[in-house]
């Protein structure tokens, strides 16, 4: 069997269209990979029968050569946050361990319409709450990349299963969802490309909600070129989501025609934080030079409220989550524990169905919305969020793109930071601001550190300017050292 | 007459404010396309949002927004060009999302008012706000020994909560307010006003105070679903509060329930147990923006409102304020009236509708709109009175069987043989016979016993089996006896 784990979607599309390979061959290859690499625990549910059926349909279409989707015949992983009709959707939680939706999320629907093939549902932090994929009810996901000292590393989170699956060649690409960095951070830890589009680009319909004002679906891929193809197939205006955008959807692959020459790239000094890994800082400086070589103009900018982004995020996201997760009450679907009375039903079901990290955030969220605390926490956080947005607006008057590291550190061993939520939350410190402002941002691997662990760089763009973000990402990709 | 409660320490004034929940008459729910039809099988009208499925999202129903704007305009209120939907968080099995989508700080409709017709004249009742919110489902506790059953057909239906100022001072005023509001809602069609189905229900805030003193502590009586119960609940609750205060105790602010069987209110939960709803803006819904053009467009589409109609009735039909109020309370009734009053004496029409017809309806516990009585049916009978073919008294006697029959006036009157005799020759014959048969009486009358005139009329009517036109009888009798 040919090894397809080293090629990307762009390459596979070519082989498929030349009829050198079939979608069924590709699918069978990845099914074998998934079986062989199940130790990484990337998938919660495998849907091989569905995959082979979809592959057959794609092959028939390719044979006829008509109605081909952008991703016709391309096997992918679907984060288990996206509801899939007739296929178990758990959001990584015991609460939804046996939940089978009877409806399809818009993002997954769009992907199937575009010919993508579903290999399975990928593991994730419970309800997308985590930065290491260590909060899943279905167990930790291992990063396929190991450091030289051979310890098991986290793949990042919350889209850890998606990232590890792509990085280990179990699928060409996978969907992720990013609330404060859940696409970009695992992409960075696994040496991949992770794109969080502008808020509103992808529909949230059928996506299990964590924090509605922040949640945004996006792709995790091996290459920037694949990222454009995936996003093209995922996004759409959707009248089932009131926050979905009607902005014209461009051809994202046009990033290849986007010239960075003369473009201004902002460097926010606030992102060079205390505790930023030295090697990451060095890589960041190298990237600056790469952009200079491309004729871009590098300028210093300031995003003065960056320091407040993390605490703001950890008020707003839990507050929204505390309401979004109230529906898991044992009454209509999902887990239901035995109980004596109504209060008991709520207590036992929610105590047993949610893990510690989810409970922690629900308690924080409930607290910050409570009478007497609302103004001091939630309302203030909303105001600070506006200031952070304004920072970006002002910065984008001076520059076209913003370059920062994706994370302050590389992938860390499983078990580390586990007992210190604050240290865990610091993982998101560089990704959260763009989330709060709803801006498109990509993480692209800029090469490895001296123990062979990937380092990701983040490009943030203006609203709905994914094309320039992809273009800048491809510059880093091409110059990867 | 002002309303006071007589306590041991003197008069107490009652202060009332109402929160009316009106279900919007709409084919689909506030945030989903599920049907709102009443009386369907349980859980057959439920979309993803209505049962709180993971990943379900609310999408606003523009029709419901329009209805709220129309309602706001018809209660003389400001329409807010920007309003916000909030989540009101609490756990209950018939609240599938774990929160109700409502409007808290920024409602769609702001300050307004409506006028009620009290015995002392018109009174203006302030309205604080109107906001849109989702209804909950229904918990059914009496169908299964071990389980509570949930019906989500009502879950997510659109409600308007209309909050009054504490301007009401008696159970009657509260009743008048609800009636007026209901007639406005029915007139513009934003709510069918059906209280039995729970489509219109009220939370009543009650407090008592000595006249001209500070407001007392209030209690809220939840979910009262008839005008009669609203009055009963207020009377009971106000008296209860007076007794507590006069016995030296304090009113505890709390939520109470009205028990219609016992006619009393009882505590549901105290202030301490009251929920912290943790309202916050729903991130699934952008702010609701309403353009000035839209407001103007809706304003132009408003029908003639009850108060406008009332003024017109007073001037056009020379009705009293009271009659006009009664007739414009319900659009069906006012249309009915106008139909009958066309080219007929409006005073006669109003008395037949508001007295005879209404008491018939009340006796049979039926709404005019639900009855099969048509304006034509009433007009047919009135035409017989107007032409003098039957007397008013005859018509009253015939009224009930006439309404219950399927016959038109002409056929009915023929069948009953009650047509009035106005033929002077025929009547004169009857009179002559009566006078001949009672010579002694005629003599007495001529000697000054004027009262006997009634006796002669009675005898003539008896002879005619009630069919003689009394006016004609009177006229000829006077001539004969002169």
Image (tube, grey):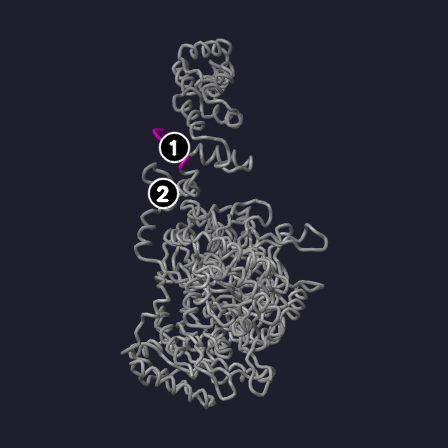
Residue, disc 1: B339
At 51% from the left edge and 34% from the top edge, which residue is drawn? B371
Crowding near the residue tagged with mark 2, few <14, some 14–19, many ≥20 C-alpha atoms within 10 Å: many
Give me the residue at 37% from left, 43% from top.
B310
Image x and y of residue A144, in percent: 56, 77
Residue drawn at (57%, 48%), measured in percent from left and top? B44
Secondary structure beneath label 2: helix
Q: Nearer the viewer, residue A227 or A277?
A: A227
Letter of the chain that mark 1 sits on in the rendering: B
- Residue B239 seen: no
Q: Is residue B476 above or below residue B4?
A: above
Residue under disc 2 on the same chain as residue under disc 1: yes
Q: Earlier in the sequence, mark 2 or mark 1?
A: 2
Q: Nearer the viewer, residue B111 or A295?
A: A295
Indicate the position of residue A297 as horizontal and vertical percent values.
Answer: 29, 82
User: As drawn, is B212 to the left or to the right of B315?
Assistant: right
The chain carrying label 2 is B
Q: Quadrant of residue B318?
A: top left
Residue at point 57% right, 53% down?
B152
Which disc number belongs to residue B331?
A: none
Whether the magenta-drawn stretch holds residue B345 is answered as yes
Mark drawn on residue B309 = 2
Q: Mainly helix, strand or loop, the magenta region?
A: helix
- Magenta part of the protein: which range? B335-349
Front residue of A143 and A374: A143
């Amino acid at each position: 069997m040919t090894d397809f784990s080293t090629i990307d979607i762009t390459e596979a599309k070519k082989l498929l269209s030349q009829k050198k390979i079939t979608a069924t061959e590709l699918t069978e290859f990845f099914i074998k990979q998934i079986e062989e690499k199940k130790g990484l625990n990337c998938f919660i549910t495998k849907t091989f029968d569905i995959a082979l059926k979809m592959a057959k349909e794609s092959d028939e279409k390719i044979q006829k050569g008509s109605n081909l989707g952008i991703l016709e015949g391309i096997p992918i992983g679907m984060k288990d946050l996206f509801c899939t009709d007739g296929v178990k959707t758990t959001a990584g939680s015991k609460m939804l361990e046996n939940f089978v939706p009877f409806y399809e999320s818009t993002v997954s629907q769009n992907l199937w319409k575009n010919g993508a093939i579903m290999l399975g549902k990928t593991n994730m932090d419970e309800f997308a709450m985590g930065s290491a994929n260590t909060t899943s009810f279905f167990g930790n996901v291992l990063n396929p990349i190991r450091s030289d000292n051979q310890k098991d590393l986290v793949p990042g989170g919350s889209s850890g299963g998606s990232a590890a699956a792509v990085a280990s060649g179990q699928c060409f690409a996978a969907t992720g969802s990013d609330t404060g960095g859940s696409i970009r951070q695992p992409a960075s830890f696994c040496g991949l490309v992770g794109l969080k589009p502008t808020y509103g680009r992808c529909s949230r319909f059928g996506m299990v909600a964590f924090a509605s004002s922040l949640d945004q679906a996006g792709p995790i891929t091996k290459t920037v070129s694949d990222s454009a193809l995936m996003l093209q197939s995922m996004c759409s205006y959707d009248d089932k989501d009131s926050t979905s955008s009607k902005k014209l959807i461009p051809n994202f692959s046009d990033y290849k025609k986007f010239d960075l020459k003369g473009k201004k790239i902002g460097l926010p000094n606030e992102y060079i934080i205390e505790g930023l890994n030295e090697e990451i800082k060095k890589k960041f400086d190298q990237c600056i030079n790469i952009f200079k070589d491309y004729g871009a103009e590098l300028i210093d900018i300031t995003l003065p409220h960056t320091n407040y982004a993390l605490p703001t995020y950890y008020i707003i996201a839990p507050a929204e989550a505390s309401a979004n997760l109230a529906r898991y009450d044992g009454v209509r679907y999902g887990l239901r524990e035995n109980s004596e009375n109504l209060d008991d039903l709520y207590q036992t079901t929610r105590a047993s169905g949610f893990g510690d990290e989810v409970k922690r955030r629900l308690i924080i969220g409930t607290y910050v919305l409570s009478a007497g605390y609302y103004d001091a926490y939630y309302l203030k956080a909303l105001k600070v969020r506006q200031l952070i947005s304004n920072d970006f607006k002002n910065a984008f008057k001076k520059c076209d793109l913003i370059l920062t590291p994706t994370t302050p550190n590389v992938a860390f061993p499983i078990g580390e930071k586990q007992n210190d939520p604050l240290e865990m939350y610091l993982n998101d410190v560089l990704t959260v601001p763009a989330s709060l402002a709803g801006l498109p941002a990509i993480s692209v691997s800029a090469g490895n550190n001296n123990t062979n662990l990937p380092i990701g760089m983040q490009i943030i763009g203006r609203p709905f300017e994914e094309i320039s973000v992809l273009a800048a990402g491809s510059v880093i990709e091409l110059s990867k050292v | 007459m002002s309303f006071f409660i007589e306590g041991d320490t003197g008069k107490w004034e009652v202060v009332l404010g109402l929160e009316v929940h009106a279900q919007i008459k709409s084919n689909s729910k506030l945030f989903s396309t599920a049907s709102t039809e009443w009386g369907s099988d349980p859980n057959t009208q439920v979309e993803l949002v209505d049962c709180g499925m993971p990943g379900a999202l609310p999408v606003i129903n523009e029709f419901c927004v329009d209805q709220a704007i129309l309602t706001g305009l018809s209660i003389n209120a400001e329409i807010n060009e920007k309003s916000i939907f909030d989540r009101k968080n609490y756990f209950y099995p018939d609240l599938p999302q774990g929160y109700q989508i409502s409007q808290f700080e920024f409602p769609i409709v702001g300050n307004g008012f409506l006028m009620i017709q009290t015995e002392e004249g018109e009174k203006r009742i302030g309205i604080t706000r109107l906001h849109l919110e989702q209804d909950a489902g229904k918990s059914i506790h009496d169908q299964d020994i071990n389980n509570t059953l949930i019906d989500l057909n009502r879950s997510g239906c659109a409600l308007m909560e209309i909050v009054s100022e504490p301007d009401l001072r008696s159970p009657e005023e509260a009743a008048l307010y609800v009636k007026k509001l209901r007639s406005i809602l029915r007139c513009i069609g934003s709510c069918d006003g059906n209280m039995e189905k729970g489509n219109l229900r009220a939370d009543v805030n009650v407090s008592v105070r000595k006249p001209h003193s500070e407001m007392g502590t209030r209690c809220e009586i939840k979910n009262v679903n008839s005008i009669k119960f609203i009055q009963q609940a207020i009377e009971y609750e106000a008296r209860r509060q007076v007794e507590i205060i006069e016995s030296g105790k304090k009113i505890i602010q709390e939520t109470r329930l009205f028990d219609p069987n016992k006619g009393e209110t009882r505590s549901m939960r105290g202030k301490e147990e009251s929920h912290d709803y943790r309202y916050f803006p729903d991130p699934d819904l952008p702010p609701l923006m309403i353009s000035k053009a839209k407001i103007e467009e809706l304003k132009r589409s408003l029908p003639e409102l009850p108060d406008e109609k009332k003024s017109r009735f007073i001037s056009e039909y020379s009705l009293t304020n009271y009659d006009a109020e009664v007739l414009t309370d319900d659009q069906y009734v006012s249309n009915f009236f106008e139909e009958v009053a066309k080219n007929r004496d409006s005073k006669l029409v109003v008395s037949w509708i508001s007295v005879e017809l209404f008491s018939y309806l009340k006796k049979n516990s039926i709404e005019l709109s639900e009855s099969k009585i048509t304006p034509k049916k009433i007009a047919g009978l009135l035409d017989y009175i107007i032409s003098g073919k039957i007397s008013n008294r005859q018509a009253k006697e015939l009224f009930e069987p006439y309404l219950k029959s399927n016959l038109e006036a002409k056929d009915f009157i023929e069948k009953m043989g009650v047509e009035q005799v106005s033929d002077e020759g025929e009547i004169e014959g009857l009179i002559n016979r009566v006078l001949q048969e009672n010579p002694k009486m005629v003599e007495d009358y001529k000697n000054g016993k004027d009262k006997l005139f009634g006796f002669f009329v009675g005898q003539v009517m008896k002879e005619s089996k009630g069919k003689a036109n009394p006016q004609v009888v009177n006229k000829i009798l006077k001539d004969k006896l002169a």
